[in-house]
Image (spheres, rainbow, N blue to C red):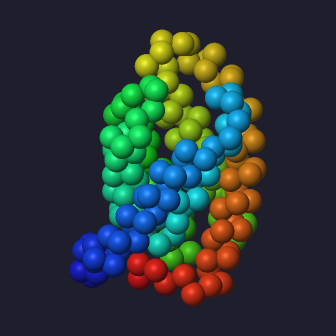
Amino acid sequence: MNSRSTVISVQEVTWMALLIAMQMVLAKLSVGSNTLKVGFSFIAIGLLGYYFGPVKAAMANVLADIISNVVMPSSGGFFLGFTFSALVAGAIYGYMLYNHKVTVWRSLVTVLLITVVVNTGLNTIWIHMMTNVPYSALLITRLPKEAFSLVYQTGLLYIVLKWIDNSKFNKIGQ
């Protein structure tokens, strides 16, 4: 490991801040009901992972979670479990996308890991802890939404990353 991989430059901080802001805006642009909500903030998190790797993407995603809860708090309030989910999601996106060729298969596996580990696994546990609704009841209601999100998130992530990979923006942060 060289010092470049452990130090965050001013340029990287600037791009991370831009992507964190983008994530916060995209999180507010979700459409649909709580049962079937289509969101787009995963694109910004995917870009953090693509550009900066697992450690920096995890740190940036934790910062994004904390900042968004301070600036634009949700109705459920701040819960540390969701911050841990943000850390895990950033690490997964970074591990799967950083310095790898953009393919549909890699996008699918990345979104599948996020869907199973973070959204269906961890987030369902956090909701159970906050509401005392039985885990199995939460899981049953969340599975159709997560199956749907797997499809559209895979497609959108692949399209965005492929476009970036073929553009002048493919070297940001490197």
The residue sitting at 65% across, 84% down in the picture is 166
Q: Quadrant of the C terminus?
A: bottom left
Question: Furthest residue to the bottom?
Answer: 168
> Residue at the location (33% across, 78% down)?
11
Q: Position of residue 100 (x, y in %)?
A: 56, 75
**104 or 148: which is nearer to us?**
148
Seen from the viewer's position, the closer of residues 30 and 108 is 30
Find residue 157 and report its image quarter: bottom right
- The quarter holding residue 108 reads bottom right
Tell me: 155 left or right of 7: right
Tell me if I can see residue 32 in this picture.
yes
* Count of marks overlaid on the render: 0
- Screen quadrant of the N terminus: bottom left
Query: Above or below — where is 13 with respect to 167?
Result: above
Residue 48 located left or right of residue 58:
right
Q: Return the x and y of residue 99 as percentages of the image width and height.
A: 51, 76
Q: Which sits in the foreground, 80 or 27?
A: 27
Q: Is residue 93 visible?
A: no
Residue 92: x and y in percent read: 49, 56
Q: Out of 78 and 59, give the one closest to the viewer.
A: 78
In the rendered image, the vertical position of residue 7 relative to residue 146, given as above or below: below
Residue lying at 41% horizontally and 40% vertically, measured from the top left: 72
**Residue at 51% across / 33% down in the picture?**
123
In the image, 86: left or right of 114? Answer: left
Q: Is residue 47 above or below residue 32?
A: below
Q: Position of residue 39 (x, y in %)?
A: 63, 46
Question: Would you identify the image quadrant in which residue 58 lies?
Answer: bottom left
